[in-house]
Image: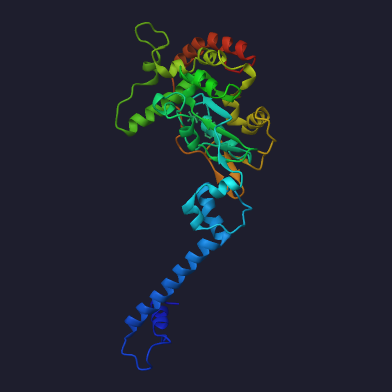
Amino acid sequence: MDPVKLFKMLASIKLPWQPTRSKIGWPRRGQIFLWIIFTSLLLFFCVTLTFNGHVWQMLDSNMHLSEYDDANEGYGLRKLLEDPEARLRQEGLEKRLPQCIIIGVRKCGTRALLEFLNLHPNIKTAGMEMHYFNKDENYDNGYEWYRKYMPFSTSKDITIEKTPRYFISESAPERIFKFNSSIKLIVIFRHPTTRVISDYSQVYENKLERNKSVEPFEKIVIDKRTGRVNTGYKAVRISMYYYHLTQWLLYFRRHQIHIVNGDNLIVNALEEIKKVETFLGLDHAITEENVYFNETRGFYCMKSGNDQHCLGAQKGRKHPDIDPKVIRKLNNFYHPYNRKLFAMIGQEFDWD
Ligand code: A3P
């Protein structure tokens, strides 16, 4: 039906208190009519919000996403204004400090791993990289500050935070040990040369977006004076996993650190996820139902009920073509570090 006609029809309905021979024309009556509808709707929503648990739950679930499906008691807006976390606490939901931290390594699949783990009903993940243990200005705020950024969880859940920068931070190992000496740590490694290329690709793309010039990979990675791998390039140093992990093993026992194979995570996500579930002492709740291979993206993506999502375009970029001689040079450079790493962790990767 034509909306203009509908409006005119509704507006022409005589209001009960109007005199039979009204001097008020239809536009005026229409306004009054709409005001009545608007006020009634407003009143209805106020009452529902205040007293009806279901409406409350609907709004609430937008704030703290699916934390409490079976809450049907009549909580209301008033309660929220008094103490927004009161109801969550009644249901055993609190912001807890992390019992597990993904400490790195940058560009090895840390975001994908975190998103996959988030599909587990007993894993709650912090939305952002906290940089709490590596940045003095954050660390100086204390644990309570850190806790406020954690997601709501029950006592059965495991809270996970990930900040890949921790892996190469000088202060993070000791600070995390002081924070919780029995904490579980997860490190994800990927072929060291591929990781450098991935790191370069990210910086390259960011610079291009800001119209800045970028030197070719080969020029940055190889020191032109010596012809050797340029260890002054940070991306090269980050892939020297042995060196960094040594700092962590000064504080933590080997069994506290789970190592994920980032190359395998790309092609066999579920296999790596199951190992993490075991490490965390959780059921294998993430199944084939929760992951699917997206041909267009070329990666596994996440599925939960009707919701399907893949990581954004900044994950899984196309890497530039690199001179094979430079790749060989990098592989040779990393070889001894890799051997030492494998011996130290008692685990080997197919990186040769
Ligand atoms: P590339 O962009 O070089 O391909 P991080 O999250 O630690 O920055 O790691 C990014 C890398 O995660 C990506 O590097 C990509 O290869 C890898 N990755 C692993 N599993 C992925 C997935 N399911 N979706 C997107 N990227 C994934």
Q: Is any part of residue 73 visible from this angle?
A: yes
- The percent coordinates of residue 339 (x first, y second) are 58, 10
Residue 93 vs residue 241, the one in the foreground: 93
With respect to residue 71, does 147 lie above or below? above
Q: Measured from the top left, where is residue 141 in percent x and y?
A: 42, 30
Residue drawn at the location 39% of the way across and 7% of the way down: 227
- Vertical comparison of 84 with 226: above or below: below
Q: Nearer the viewer, residue 152 or 123?
A: 152
Q: Residue furthest front?
A: 82
Left or right of 12, for residue 309: right
Task: Classify residue 208 by image quadrant.
Answer: top left
Image color mode: rainbow
Is the C terminus in the top left, top right, bottom left or bottom right quadrant?
top right
Task: Looking at this view, name the residue that lies furthest to the top.
Answer: 226
Q: Is residue 315 visible?
A: no
Image height check: is 245 above or below 316?
above
**Residue sitting at the far right:** 283
Count every numbered label the image shows and give the total: 0
166 displayed left or right of 308: left
Quadrant in the picture for the N terminus: bottom left
Q: Quadrant of residue 349?
A: top right
Q: Nearer the viewer, residue 132 or 337?
A: 132
Give the farthest residue toward the bottom.
Answer: 21
Give percent across and percent down for residue 289: 66, 43
Is residue 344 left or right of 29 when viewed as pictured? right
Horizontally, is 155 left or right of 173 in the view? Answer: right
- Residue 58 x %, y %: 54, 56
